Image (cartoon, grey):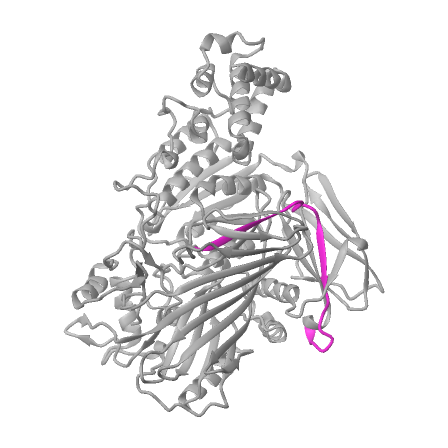
Amino acid sequence: MNAKIKCCNKQKQAFCTVTQSTWRELGRDRKEYRCQTSKMAPWGLIGRAQVADACEQTHNRFKPPKVHVVTLKAVDIRVTVRGFAARVDASLTYHNATDNALELEFRMPVDEGAAVYKFEAVIGGRKISAQCLEKKKAEKIYKDAVQSGHTAVLAREDALTADTFHLALGNLPGGSQAELQLSMMMELKVKTDGAVSFTLPTVLNPRYCPCDISPSQHTESVARTGNSETVIVSEAYTFGINAKVQGGHVIARIASHRESLNVELSDDSMSAEVTQDSGGFKPDHDWSMLVYYTNPYKTHIIRESGERAGTGLMKDDLVMVNLHPEFTEESYSHRNEILFVVDCSGSMHGDRIQSARATLLLFLKSLPTGCYFNVISFGSTYSLLFSDGSQEYTEETLKKALGLHSTIEADMGGTEILQPIKQIYSTPPKPGYARQIILLTDGQVFNVDQVKELVSRHAHETRVFAVGIGDGASTALVYGLARAGRGHAEMVYQQDKLQLKVMGLVRSMLQESAQDVRIIFDVDPPGGIKLIPKNPPIIFGGQHLIMYVRVPTSTEVKSITVSGVVGNAEFKNCYSGSDVVTIHDEEKTLHRLAARAQINEWQIDNEEDVVEDMITLSLATGVVCRRTALVGVDQDMKPVGHNPEAQPIPRTRSPGVSFRSMLKKMRKKIYFNKESPIKSRVIAERDADGDMGEEAESVSEGHSPVDCGKNLMSVVSLQKFDGSWTLEDAVKITSLPHLLLAGATTYKNETSWATSVVLAFLETKYSAEKDEWALLANKAQMFIARCGDDVEALMVAARKVLAEN
């Protein structure tokens, strides 16, 4: 069994202890060990080396493993943002304080779509540069080098999830310092509010492993990551982040919801330098930055030159197309079967489940009449709001759903996400209705591939939209499911932004699928154009779309046309060759991002006939995939000799007990049955009694506060099934007298007038949150029109009443 490392920081001291009784607690009672301070950084970057007999079993009790902790001295991150792409260079400095050479392993979180392409180590002034090779070959080179006493490095993607990388350093000499350098490329998408969002994953949360993951599948990940022990960490490490923003876009501003940043903008606003303030960054959450360009929705087409001496993809030029297609209102359909799947596992406790509850309320109120819906809650088990399947959205079914909304809690144990998805697919979609799944989860699971494979098999009949909640949520699961289900995904790091992200997905969900998508390049000479990946992308109106196209170096691009059909309407976007900007980038950022996009699609298809193509593309571009790895060996250094303490971490065994049988026992005792609701850190906003404050409280129907307009959710909770608000509701929300509102103007229907007043109130007080209540407003306006009133005339009158009072 491997060690789980946690660092506890207090006044620049890091300390933690483990005792025999604590170990028994972990093995028998599944309690998470909590040290003397409440602030605990999730483990991963701290290095460890495990010695022989680390999982010795005596009298049915596990002894704590003997673990060497290699001091993590510093983390230095350099980020370069160019338009809608970023390069990240991460430097991790470690010190081996022992007298012996050690074989070490580290874990590093990465974004699921990141293209990891470079790994180097600097030890004693010597640089070890890794090369991308087929995985089994790379692992053999590493193993042989370490056994012969040479220092070697190895970087590989986790066997079960693409958002975690394992870094290994063999034979780090005693008393020496090593600097590990990892480089990667990342796509940047324009979010709902127009910001180009960059997020650096720094949190590694323990992942729940369902019972249907076999020991052979899980052994590699568990053995490398550890899941059980807290060890001593004697000092805190520094964490520095510096970012540059450049690339031909006018920068309006740079901000962060969570970080205190120093931003130096150039005189022409075309570039900026960003640093953390003097307080530094505390790596207990993912680091994020928002870049606002003056015109983020403008189409940008970049052509990156290839390597003349390169092979395959790297030899040709690569075109990146960024656009925001807009669809008409006719593209929205009411004939949808919508399934809202909510993670209620223990790890969703606190502010996450509070936000999920408020989001469920907004979702239920925004559904259009005529659709079918269901709500599925899941944890170790799952439950359906309507056990007989989706029901038509009526006043009665909405009332039942609101009853569930008021009682939903994070009390369902582990994260068994596969079973509820299987249940959904066990019944066919409603005839004549498009089935859509929207998933809310913190995504802390190992069986990502199983779920993606299932979703991919049913993508022709069911689209999947996913929202990842909180730091450390699995981007491999969230983005992977949306890609496999031909939907869209969002990550939410601030829980108060959850409603905004979910409602953005709901708008995409209500759009009909784009059909007959065609991407035409008019080039001279003709031919040689290849779309990467080869299948046309999924297109949603108003959402940032990124496409990659491989173009021969001698080819001139005259025009680009993207067209298709949505519902009964055609869309067509045409761009001139003069819109194409050519760049020269030695790191070949766009080439490697295109390679990663193709690899992601192949890994979802999971077909054997693409394995060779995947490996070939990975080797040509250096972008690591699940079947390749980066390996390097220091051939010049004198062998440091074999150290009996430098045991390969995944290969320890208990005397007289097979690893398979031991893993089965651990499944029953430790990680597999139930997810611990105990968190490794305390949310700063929580008060001493555990309350999250008024803003996090959800409001159920019929229990409104006195001042019903004080927060958006209280207004939402009063809306009726048909989209209306009564005059009594309008009085509560606006705090205006009943007689004043009743006699303010002429109308055919009192309720339609009251609804107009509430809509005007939303426009006035909650204009910044319009994306959250836009679907509510559409529903309300349809109600007014059905009553025979003039929608715009009533809205003008309502705005006037509010302005004058």
Q: Nearer the viewer, residue 551 or 568?
A: 551
Residue 644 percent across, percent down from the top left: 31, 87
Q: Which of 122/653 is in front?
A: 122
Left or right: residue 689 compared with residue 104? left
Residue depicted at 48% across the width and 79% down the height: 122
The residue stretch that appears in magenta: 286-312
Residue 244 in the figure: left or right of residue 36:
right
Q: Please give the count of numbered marks on the rendered protein.
A: 0
Observer-nearest residue: 512 or 742?
742
State whether residue 622 appears in this view: yes
Q: Residue 458 in the image: state x and y as whole percent.
A: 53, 53
Which residue sits at x=60%, y=36%? Answer: 333
Image location of residue 493, percent across then percent down = 45, 49
Q: Residue furthest right?
A: 525
Give percent across and percent down for residue 656: 22, 80
- In this rendering, the answer to whether 331 lies above or below 30 is above
Instruction: Decide if residue 407 is on the left or right side of residue 769.
Output: left
Look at the image and tell me in which quarter the N terminus lies. bottom left
